[in-house]
Amino acid sequence: MQNPEVKFVYPRFFNSRIKEWLSDPDWYPTHDALREYMGSLQKLWSERGDEVMSIIAKRIGVPWADPQHTCYIIGVRRGLSSPLAIGYLEDDEKGFDHLTHEMIHRYYIQDDRSLYQHPGWKKLMDLYAKETETTRNHIPVHALHKHVYLKMDRRDRLEKEIANLVRDEYKRAWEIVQAEGEEKILDFFSKN
């Protein structure tokens, strides 16, 4: 099966509304900056995105279900997997890594959350039941992201990602992935 297309969209009206709702809207990127960022991210994804999606599907053994994903570019520095939205980052490579992270989330929830319903997923979640929900959900995301980083020879980006984490739940998930090994974690629910 062919990998899905990622369609990039700049929602001008939505970005204007977000900026209006902020208590300090001066830091919000301009429309031109957001459009330029979208173009840079779109270029990077067109060069490497298909490889990312192939590595993901090959490792887990489940094809991508959706033929297209719409990615909204927004000015806040956070992202979402559903709807897929990537926040503005000054570093385009970090934006690419962020999009990869969110696409991994989307992969796990595709096709009516099929991988979340896999018996191995429950075993993995039970194994780390004392961790927060955010940490538990990010263990398989980070494991697959590490697998992608290494397959694409992006160890330097992996190290930067881990070094620059700000949320404790994400740090803890990376600690678990580093201690257990990404392949061991992915084997819980991989069909390969």
Image (cartoon, helix red, strand yellow):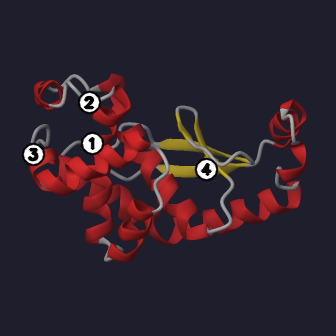
**Residue 67 in the image: above or below residue 128:** below
Q: Disc 2 to disc 1, how far (Cα)?
A: 10 Å
- From the image, state whether disc 1 or disc 4 is nearer to you: 1
Label 1 with label 4: CB-CB less than 8 Å: no
Query: Tag 1 or tag 2, which sits nearer the N-term?
Result: 2
Using residue 1 as the reference point, say whether residue 4 is left or right of it: right
Residue for badge 1 = 139
Query: Tag 1 or tag 3, which sits nearer the N-term?
Result: 1
Q: Disc 4 to disc 2, how far (Cα)?
A: 35 Å
Find residue 187 and name its label: 3
- From the image, state whether disc 2 or disc 1 is nearer to you: 2
Residue for badge 4 = 7
Question: In the picture, residue 17 is in which quadrant?
Answer: top right
Q: Position of residue 69 (x, y in %)?
A: 53, 42
Q: Is residue 63 visible?
A: no
Q: How many marks?
A: 4
Label 4 with label 2: CB-CB less than 8 Å: no
Q: Amino acid at mark 3?
A: Asp
Using residue 66 as the reference point, say whether residue 87 is left or right of it: right
Q: Position of residue 127 (x, y in %)?
A: 12, 30
Q: Position of residue 160 (x, y in %)?
A: 43, 69
Judged from the image, the secondary structure of the residue bearing numbered disc 4 is strand
Q: Disc 1 to disc 4, how far (Cα)?
A: 27 Å
Q: Amino acid at mark 4?
A: Lys
Find residue 70 and name its label: none
Estimate how packed mark 1 is, as few (under 14), some (14 to 19) or many (20 or more) residues with alpha carbons within 10 Å.
many
The residue at the point 10 percent across, 27 percent down is 123
The residue at the point 84 percent across, 35 percent down is 22
Q: Disc 3 to disc 4, how far (Cα)?
A: 31 Å
Judged from the image, the secondary structure of the residue bearing numbered disc 2 is loop
Query: Tag 2 or tag 4, which sits nearer the N-term?
Result: 4
Residue for badge 2 = 131
